[in-house]
Image (cartoon, rainbow, N blue to C red):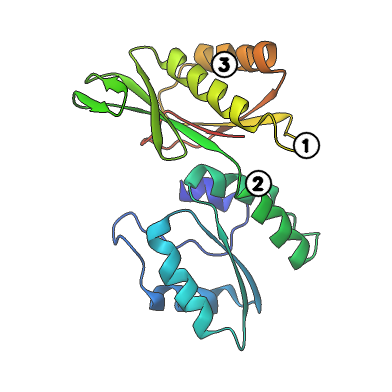
Amino acid sequence: MNKFINEFKVDKIINCESSGTPSIQEFLDAFKQVRSTQILLVVHDSNILLAAQQAAQLVKNTLNIQIINARDISVSFLCCLAYNPIDNFNTNVKLLTQISKKTYGKVAKANKDVVYFSVNIKSGNYIGLVNKDVITANKSMLVVIKNIIDKIKNERSNRKNPSKNLYLFVGNDVPIETIRTIEKYVAEQHNLKLEVINTGQTLYFFNVVY
């Protein structure tokens, strides 16, 4: 994942996989390493947000820290993709803030039987989430990803200037035939262009942003 993000020329990554929530000091150290007075800080976890805000407050007299609350790793990926070093700082802040409000979904696999509100999940099922809510479960990966795409598209279709692109971040062990089927479905059923990005991550089979 870090290698993937580094391709977007991110100056500093605070890795939380082993240590959990980073400390305020870790943020302050990262600010120093970036060596800039204007910093865009993209945060994708609500548990990290408070520490990021507190760190930014401590250096507000010397650094302009703008925090983008991406809410999910897939949205933070999209923020990295959209960042344009040619544009000025405020333009990028506005753009990434808009992107941070996009709807996201993900496909994972259940390891036990459970009922989540009205969704009956069996061990081994693929489960689909939109934002943080489980909305579907099925033994077919394709059924689940289609249900996610349908819900996301329907929820955002009435918004002003809806996007023509749907972003699909693909994890490990996803057959190319599955991706091609999704691409065809998105084009024929929703008149959208599918942008496919291979992340190599192992936690989710798919992350979707629209």
Crowdedness of circle 2 by 10 Å Cα count: few (<14), some, many (20+)? Answer: some
Badge 2 element: helix
Q: Can you say whether 115 is above or below 95 in the image? A: above
Mark earlier in primary sequence (1, 2)? 2
Badge 1 element: loop
**Residue at the spot 40% in from the left edge and 76% down from the top edge:** 24
**Which residue position is annotated with label 1?**
161
Residue type, numbered disc 1:
Asn
Residue type, numbered disc 2:
Leu
Mark earlier in primary sequence (3, 2)? 2
The one nearer the camera, 55 or 175, is 55
**Which residue position is annotated with label 2?**
81
Q: Can you say whether 76 is above or below 94 in the image? A: above
Q: Nearer the viewer, mark 3 or mark 1?
A: 1
- Residue 181, image x and y in percent? 56, 11
**Which residue position is annotated with label 3?**
182
The one nearer the camera, 170 or 61, is 61
